[in-house]
Image (cartoon, rainbow, N blue to C red):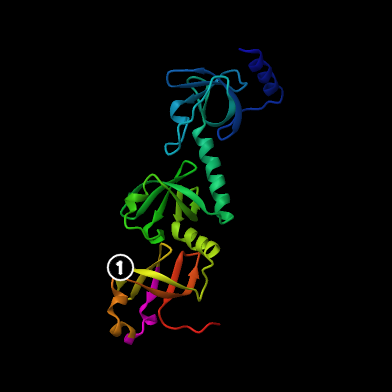
Amino acid sequence: MSFKQKKFSQVLNKYQYNFHTGDIIAGEIFSREQKGYLVDIGNQTAGYLPLEEVSLPEAESTVLKAYEIREFFILAYNVESRQLVLSVKRLTYIRAWERLKQLKQENISINAYVQGVNKGGLLVEIEGIQGFIPNSHLCYTPSKNSLVKTNILCKFLVANEQNNKLILSNRCAIVEKIMDNNNIKVGSIVKAKVIKTTSFGIFFDVYTIPALLHKSEIQTQHLEGNNNVVTTGTTCPVTIIHLDPGQGRISVSIKPHSKS
């Protein structure tokens, strides 16, 4: 036993302090083993950090150096070896969630790294935690696959550590950004391209946001007189009648609206 370990053990015994599962403690890595690391935590027996407890699966690999002092999470106690089983991964996970919940509370936009796509949306990663952006909260893009391995601006919709559920919105972040940077407001007139027609209205591309022109905002005579308005790919001026950064929505009209 090193002098450091012995001295610290005496302090622990004096105050009858015991380490517990769930504690966060400081320790010094002093040996690399075949399947993990030995860590000097000041106890009579060195703590053990398994390789699988070094880094989160979604995060970059954590490189540990000999004689590096850092914090560890006490994962369990191995009765057979009489060693505390330590984790860096669990501590990283806890602190990542603390940051994510704080960012959500402050309503801050953040860049998420796009790892992949599925039918429902994008698989992304922030702070080593995997998240999801549903299709309904994506900005207009001809191909979702083109976003893989890029960063995408997002707002938090759900950040639930207990269920390990992180759901984000690209649209909410972009609507807020264009309101701030492009001076877009209710009453603004912009030129927008038709991207989709439906039974309930037409969707225009307004700064990559699919903006809805509801059928109630379409004049019958306008449609009859100009069929190009409802043709995908054509462009025409539209008036912004509703902006909702909280839901990532924009509504537009081609009817003349009086200024308030």
Q: Residue at x 55, y 50 (%)?
A: 101
64, above or below 169, in the image: above
Nearer to the camera, 255 or 155: 255
Residue 118 position, x and y percent, is 32, 51
Query: What residue sits 54% from the left and 67% below the top?
Result: 183
Compared with 85, 156 (above or below) is below
Q: Position of residue 150 (x, y in %)?
A: 41, 46
Q: Position of residue 135 (x, y in %)?
A: 36, 58
Side of 16 relative to 152 (left or right): right
Number of numbered discs on residues: 1
Compared with 150, 71 (above or below) is above
Dividing the image into 4 quarters, which one contains the N terminus? top right
**Is 225 situated left or right of 168 in this image?**
left
Query: Residue placed at 40% from the left, 60% from the top?
Result: 139
Dividing the picture into quadrants, the one containing residue 26 is: top right
In this view, the residue in front, 58 or 91, is 58
Pointer 1 residue = 233
SS at mark 1 in the image:
loop
Q: In this view of the protein, which residue sits in the foreground, 76 or 159?
A: 159
Using residue 69 as the reference point, say whether residue 142 is left or right of it: left
- Whether residue 241 is visible, yes or no, is yes
Q: Nearer the viewer, residue 231 or 161?
A: 231
Residue type at mark 1: give it: Gly
| Image quarter of the C terminus | bottom right
- Residue segment shown in magenta: 211-221
Query: Does the magenta segment cover residue 230?
Result: no
Q: Residues within 10 Å of mark 1 (few under 14, many from 20)?
A: some
* Residue 199 seen in the figure: no
Residue sitting farthest toward the bottom: 221
Q: Is residue 212 magenta?
A: yes
